[in-house]
Image (tube, rainbow, N blue to C red):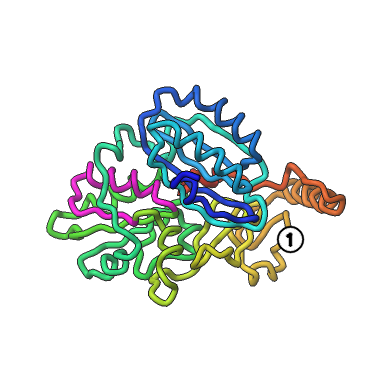
Amino acid sequence: MSMTEASIPGTDQIVVAALYKFVSLPDFEELKPQLEELCNQNSVLGTLLLATEGINGTVSAPRAGIVALMNFLWADSRFADLAPKYSIAPDQAFTRMKVKLKREIVTMGKDGIDPNRLVGRYVKPADWNALIQDPDTLVIDTRNSYEYAIGTFEGALDPATDTFRQFPEWIEKNLKSLPAEKRPKKIAMFCTGGIRCEKSTAYMLEQGFDEVYHLEGGILKYLEEVPQEQSMWKGECFVFDQRVSVTHGLQIGTYELCHACRMPITEEEKQSDKYIQGVGCPHCYDSLTEDQKSRFGERQKQIQLAKMRNEKHIGRKMPPKEVGIEADASRLAE
């Protein structure tokens, strides 16, 4: 067993692998059928995004399937140092496999941003607390508002974005417009797995900010490595798969997903008279049309019938919202 293969958890449960790498891939279109065939042959489910700037995605499979996928990627010198973030799930975290060709592996919508050329300073999880407690540091959560709402670091600023594409505009309005003497001395940024911070720190440096830092490995690595008693993380971390959220030690969290609006919902919200399983929740119920409620209700009925027959229902999927399988791919944006 190679050292790289040895890094994959040995378990009888499902292994979830979140991975990304910014690297020149002029042949990205040719990789698509190869990856599709390999994943289909090895029971690998999830989403992988390919673009000329690299690869991004989150997948789940029995350990042998993840080993097969990673050995295939590691055999390509461009991915030799690819280091996924692994976690464990009791069941498959996805319902299907997709390999998509994209313009960007995480959508910022700004041309010329290349993390291989310019990127912020990486900060290990063990050193993160000291940085974000520094009074000269502005801490920015680069994720979206629905992610921030269920958990973030103490003192982190919420840009209140709905998609990562809105992040540059927020920077323009709120930070770049400040006179030099009022700009923060240090900026620390974080996201689920690190990919959004790769691009956002590159963008910040392009805009003239000097001391820009980001959490290496993202929130997932922090929750994995930093003991809970030392943690500055509050709440849970949204993930882009059927687990919905994770906590310290990457244990499965308490949130579920509304399959109408794709918002994470609490047990308390499920007690609302505006929560109907598979139909709507307090976040979206009032905005749904009667036709939508009827269609969603029928879909849920078919899901329940399929479950009673011990069959899978193709409609029961984690609908994409944005990759950022921080994946982060993973509402396959992060």
Q: Quadrant of residue 22?
A: top left
The answer to whether residue 286 is seen in the rendering is no
Q: Is residue 140 left or right of residue 118?
A: right
Residue located farthest toward the left when viewing the structure as drawn: 181
Residue furthest out toward the bottom: 229
Q: Residues within 10 Å of mark 1 (few under 14, many from 20)?
A: some
In the image, residue 202 lies in the stretch drawn in magenta: yes
Camera-side residue of 146 and 67:
67
Region of the chain picked out in magenta, as a range = 193-215
Q: Residue at x 34, y 46 (%)?
A: 198
Q: Nearer the viewer, residue 329 or 141?
A: 329
State the count of labels: 1
Where residue 98 sits, quadrant-wise, is: top right
Element at badge 1?
loop
Identify which residue, 112 or 269, lies in the foreground: 112
Residue 158 visible in the shown view: yes
Q: What's under tag 1, amino acid-wise?
A: Ile
Residue pointed to by mark 1:
276
